[in-house]
Image (cartoon, rainbow, N blue to C red):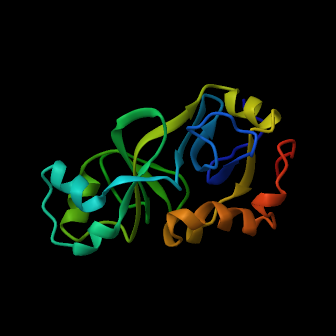
Amino acid sequence: MSAFDLTDHFLIAMPGMMDPVFSKCLMYICEHHDQGALGLVVNRPIAMNLASMLGELGIASRNEEFEKVPVYFGGPVEMERGFVLHQPVGQWQSTIAVTESVGLTTSQDILQSLGQGSGPRHVLVALGYAGWAPGQLEHELSQNAWLSAKSSKEILFETAAEERLPAALRMMGIDWANLSESAGHG
């Protein structure tokens, strides 16, 4: 069993992270238990917006604001699969409650609801996810690959993608330029 639970935490890739997939990444951990962990990269928009994604799925929407809502690279696992991080949790076909107020849904009914204008107030849509086997995340933390911090819903849902990593660091009182490759985690 995991000694600690990082569900609803941010992981910040340390400067020494050599894997280009995760370099300078801000990860949100949606699930962490003795069977492993699942997270989404929340600061890497891709060349797709929510309007075009809905269109590709055949979901009608008249919300022009969706053209300004980016879709994110959520991680290197199952990159063709969509994940919707949202607030409030709501009632969808396939949702895990990350917290009492944040859910992660993989069923299309949430996207159909968004298209109809009745979806959750805050959404972050990602393709793919990051996953860790049992003990793998704990090992990476012990190797100083990640810095961990309690998440912030404002950073997650109300901060521009390019500002999320610096905002998470500021929340911890850290400046990226002063972050050492050999730092521990908070």
For the N terminus, the image quarter is: top right
Please tell me whether residue 84 is drawn above or below residue 37 in the rendered image: below
Q: Nearer the viewer, residue 93 or 70?
A: 70
Front one among 142 and 145: 145
Residue at x 28% of width, y 68% of height: 66
Residue extending furthest toward the front: 177
Q: Position of residue 101 (x, y in %)?
A: 51, 64
Q: Is residue 126 left or right of residue 133?
A: left
Q: Quadrant of residue 125?
A: bottom left
Q: Specify whether 173 is left or right of 84.
A: right
User: Residue 131: where, in percent of width, then height?
Assistant: 55, 33
Q: Position of residue 158 (x, y in %)?
A: 51, 72
**Measured along the vertical axis of the image, is residue 139 above or below residue 4?**
above
Apparent side of residue 151 relative to residue 159 in the rendered image (left or right): right
**Closer to the camera, 24 or 170?**
24
* Residue at the image point whose x is 12% and y is 51% from the top: 58
Residue 99 sits in quarter: bottom right
Does residue 6 appear left or right of residue 31 in this picture?
right
Q: Position of residue 39 (x, y in %)?
A: 55, 43
Residue at 70% over, 44% down: 5
Residue sitting at x 70%, y 38%: 17
